[in-house]
Amino acid sequence: LLAAGPLVVIAPHAALLQKVPQPKGLFNSTVRLHAGMTVAIEQLSAWLQEIGFHRETRVEDVGTYAVRGGVVDMYPYNSDYPIRAEFFGDTLESLRCFSVYSQKSVAPCDSADILPMREFALSAAQVAAGTERMLAWGKDTGADLNALHGLEHQWRRAGDLEGIEAVDPIPRIRSCPL
């Protein structure tokens, strides 16, 4: 999706009807890291949470990340190995690929593009705006507000909103057909 130019897709009809993120949204949701950049570990952690990563004490599975002192480990699905980012203060000193099993470095890398773990990664602000619209709709139409409050609670607490594109008008997800 991020490549410029024409694209030929061979897929079943049902797959072509599925919503996919707009290229701009995917581009904006990608976390780009390179040695020497300035970023606070707390900010990197927030970005990873926002694009669908789950914080763990040790990175062993795709879609997880861990923070230990000045080290952030993350395992994006678009990488053969997890990536270890070593910080000195807010400066990213180095990036390395490491083995899940031994937790030892395999190879250094100059940069890494961390893609979102799900197709539609919604920020906390988007979830809040979507729940406000949902509750306003419920009041206007006389819908069961208790059920809508339950859904609101689920959205705010879940953190993982997989399948949210099915209720597209509520969070106003920007999508495009293939």
Image: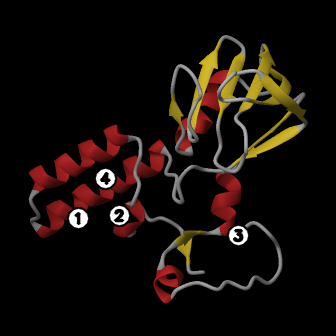
Residue 135 falls left or right of residue 16: left
> Mark 3 is on which residue type?
Leu
- Residue designated by label 3: 1
Marks 2 and 1 in Cβ contact (< 8 Å): yes
- Mark 4 or mark 2, which has the lower sequence index? 4
Q: CA distance from mark 2 to mark 1?
A: 9 Å
- Residue designated by label 1: 137
Residue beneath the point at 32% across and 38% down: 157
- Mark 1 or mark 4, which has the lower sequence index? 4
For discs 2 and 1, the disc positioned in front in the rendered view: 2
The image position of residue 17, as x and y in percent, is 48, 83
- Residue designated by label 2: 170
To which quarter of the image does residue 87 belong?
A: top right
- Residue designated by label 4: 132
For discs 4 and 2, the disc positioned in front in the rendered view: 2
Mark 1 lies on a secondary structure that is: helix
For discs 3 and 4, the disc positioned in front in the rendered view: 3
